């Protein structure tokens, strides 16, 4: 089921085009990452989805409803990059407050805090929480009313690696229950591992979209191959791979995606002299840099 649909979506501020004819669909349970340099249009896209600004052209719907309409608002949750809570309130008091504002039952606060792993800290003041714990309060708040679409702006910025992993595990659980997740991030390595699809914006235009595999194919960047020779067989390996550069006791060479099999044949041909080798595909940071540069 389609939860979010953007078609030819355009937003202009005066003569500047912040978002230029963007198409995008999110189905239930999909996790989609929005990448782009500063000013690429990520926040504008999110604001349009939340109904905070009006579109200049194109269409947008949240489960068939206009963004900002009462139904779309009830179906959508938003977690901004920097969530601010009252430091003197406990986690439980803060979530009870939000539940009252959203017409929910304040008694549900403990269940929500438990869901985000804050059951033990529910009675502590938010002023004593770490940044990761405050982000979880934000997530608990966003979970009120079981949203079908969750929009997260840089949700893990400032979190340590363990908190980031735990945060993504919570998102995985939400997605597994059918919530569509749209998040923006600059932390490419985590997006690489924890989202189903990646959308790259540049100057308001969608310049790439797909799984990491799709993007890898589009970018057509070469693989990197590291080869370590057996002791005493260095010159034999060096002559088998004359194009390689040597550093730190290893030979390093690149191989086009389309020439993987030839590379395997060459490696097996020199197998007697090789102690170890690694074939490293380009990571999302390389692919992102390549696609953004090409778009610019
Ligand atoms: N309210 C506004 N009035 C005029 N121009 C705006 C407004 N909001 C955004 N813009 C412009 O629209 C373009 C896209 O901005 P946007 O904030 O969507 O980018 P972004 O990808 O979210 O960037 P960042 O990563 O820095 O948050 C920029 O050129 C920005 O200056």
Image (cartoon, rainbow, N blue to C red):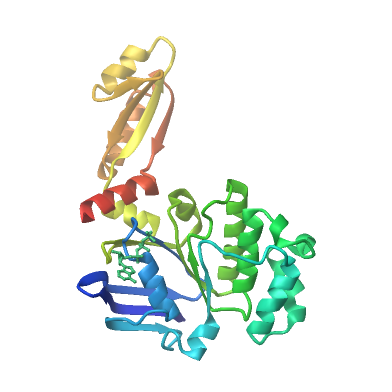
Out of 258 and 295, give the one closest to the viewer.
295
Apparent side of residue 194 relative to residue 14 in the rendered image (left or right): right
Residue at figure coordinates x 43%, y 88% from the top left:
64
Q: Looking at the image, is 269 positioned above or below residue 12?
A: above
Residue at figure coordinates x 24%, y 50% from the top left:
293
Apparent side of residue 45 relative to residue 135 in the rendered image (left or right): left
Out of 194 and 129, give the one closest to the viewer.
129
Apparent side of residue 60 relative to residue 56 in the rendered image (left or right): right
Farthest-out residue, top:
232
> What x and y, as percent, mark residue 272?
40, 20
| Rendered-image quadrant of the C terminus | bottom left
> What x and y, as percent, mark residue 152?
50, 66
Q: Looking at the image, is 22 positioned above or below residue 249?
A: below
Residue at figure coordinates x 38%, y 49% from the top left:
284
> What x and y, as percent, mark residue 106?
74, 81
Q: Quadrant of ligand 1?
A: bottom left
> What x and y, as percent, mark residue 227?
38, 26
Q: Quadrant of residue 249?
A: top left
Q: Looking at the image, is 180 positioned above or below residue 192?
A: below
């Amino acid at each position: 089921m389609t939860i979010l649909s953007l078609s030819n979506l355009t937003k202009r501020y005066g003569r500047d085009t912040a978002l230029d004819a963007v198409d995008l669909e999110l189905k239930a349970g999909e996790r989609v990452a929005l990448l782009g340099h500063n000013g690429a249009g990520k926040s504008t896209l999110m604001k349009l989805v939340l109904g905070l600004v009006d579109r200049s052209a194109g269409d947008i719907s949240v489960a068939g409803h206009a963004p900002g309409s009462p139904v779309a608002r009830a179906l959508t949750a938003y977690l901004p990059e920097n969530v601010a809570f009252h430091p003197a309130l406990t986690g439980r008091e803060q979530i009870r407050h939000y539940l009252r504002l959203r017409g929910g039952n304040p008694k549900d606060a403990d269940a929500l805090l438990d869901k985000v792993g804050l059951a033990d800290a529910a009675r502590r003041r938010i002023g004593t929480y770490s940044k990761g714990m405050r982000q979880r309060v934000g997530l608990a708040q966003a979970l009120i009313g079981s949203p079908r679409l969750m929009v997260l702006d840089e949700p893990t910025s400032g979190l340590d690696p363990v908190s980031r992993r735990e945060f993504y595990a919570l998102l995985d659980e939400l997605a597994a229950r059918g919530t569509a997740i749209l998040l923006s991030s600059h932390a490419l390595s985590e997006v690489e591992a924890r989202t189903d699809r990646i959308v790259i914006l540049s100057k308001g235009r969608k310049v790439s979209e797909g799984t990491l595999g799709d993007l890898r194919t589009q970018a057509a960047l070469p693989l990197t191959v590291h080869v370590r020779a057996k002791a005493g067989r260095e010159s034999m390996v060096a002559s088998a791979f004359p194009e390689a550069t040597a550093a730190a006791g290893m030979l390093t060479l690149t191989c086009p995606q389309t020439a993987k099999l030839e590379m395997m044949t060459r490696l097996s041909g020199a197998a007697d002299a090789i102690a170890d080798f690694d074939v490293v595909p380009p990571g999302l940071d390389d692919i992102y840099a390549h696609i953004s540069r090409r778009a610019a």
